[in-house]
Amino acid sequence: MCCGDFNCGGDDEWSVCSDLLSVLDTHGLQQLVRSPTRTTSNTASLLDLVICNQISSRVAQVTVHPSHVSDHDLVTWILTAPLKPKPQLVAFRFRSLNKVDWARFQDDLRQSELFTSPADNASEFAEQLDAVSVDILNRHCPIHERKRFMSARRDNRWLSVSAVDAKRQRRRLERRWRTTRRSEDYIVYRKMCRTANKVSSLSLVVCSKDR
């Protein structure tokens, strides 16, 4: 099986170049993507392909999804294998930040030795700042440890409320543009894609530091 951006679009948005199809047929291969994979405000083309043997049945459910990152969409499929991998048990640690009373957290910081008796030099104060802050955070938001079997689904537990809202808004604007096909709706949708990606990235970085 091979896949990638072949850049061999056909006469319409649902087809590929006839010369490429002839080459595939000569070698006993088939192309499985059936919808356009690159979409702009005024064009659509089938450029990203998934190719396998004509007699193979291991590749199934080839689907094109909006990538929200590039003007090329994301192509996914299910690849069956003779052996099913064993589920992996993974351990992880996390803090329940949504349950923290941030007003009380700030009050405890102001009443701590960081304010009442700060260290005399920068190095000692940095160590003091780290130790006191972590101690107060552990009281308000202790670290939880869990084990679970690894899931194939994408984990969005570390996304902030603003990141979830931004992704929801992005999907709404995408539906509007795909309905109207207006260039102004496409511009608003792409702008929201960049905003959602930025907010999501910042959310994951903050959460990874807290862990």
Image (spheres, helix red, strand yellow):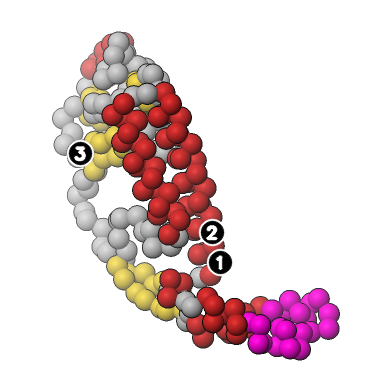
For label 3, the SS is: strand
The residue labelled by disc 1 is 209
- Name the mark on residue 118: none
Q: CA distance from mark 3 to mark 1?
A: 38 Å
Q: Earlier in the sequence, mark 2 or mark 3?
A: 3
Q: Are marks 3 and 1 in contact (CB under 8 Å)?
A: no
Q: Is residue 125 magenta?
A: yes
- Name the mark on residue 205: 2
Q: Residue shown at 37%/76% (left/top)? A: 146
Which amino acid type corresponds to the residue marked 3 in the rendered image? Gln
Q: CA distance from mark 2 to mark 3?
A: 33 Å
Is residue 6 rendered to the left or right of residue 18? right
Q: Residue shown at 45%/33% (left/top)? A: 188
Q: Position of residue 74 (x, y in %)?
A: 35, 37
Look at discs 2 and 3 and give the one toward the viewer. Answer: 2
> Which segment did they paint magenta?
109-129
Q: Quadrant of residue 83?
A: bottom left
Q: Tell me, yes or no, if residue 6 can be seen here.
A: no
Q: CA distance from mark 1 to mark 2?
A: 6 Å
Q: Are marks 1 and 2 in contact (CB under 8 Å)?
A: yes
Q: Residue shown at 22%/56% (left/top)? A: 84
Which amino acid type corresponds to the residue marked 1 in the rendered image? Lys
Is residue 195 rendered to the left or right of residue 32? right
Is residue 30 rendered to the left or right of residue 140? left
Q: Position of residue 37 (x, y in %)?
A: 34, 28
Packing grade of label 3 (10 A; few <14, some 14-19, many >=20) is few
What secondary structure is the magenta-colored segment mainly?
helix
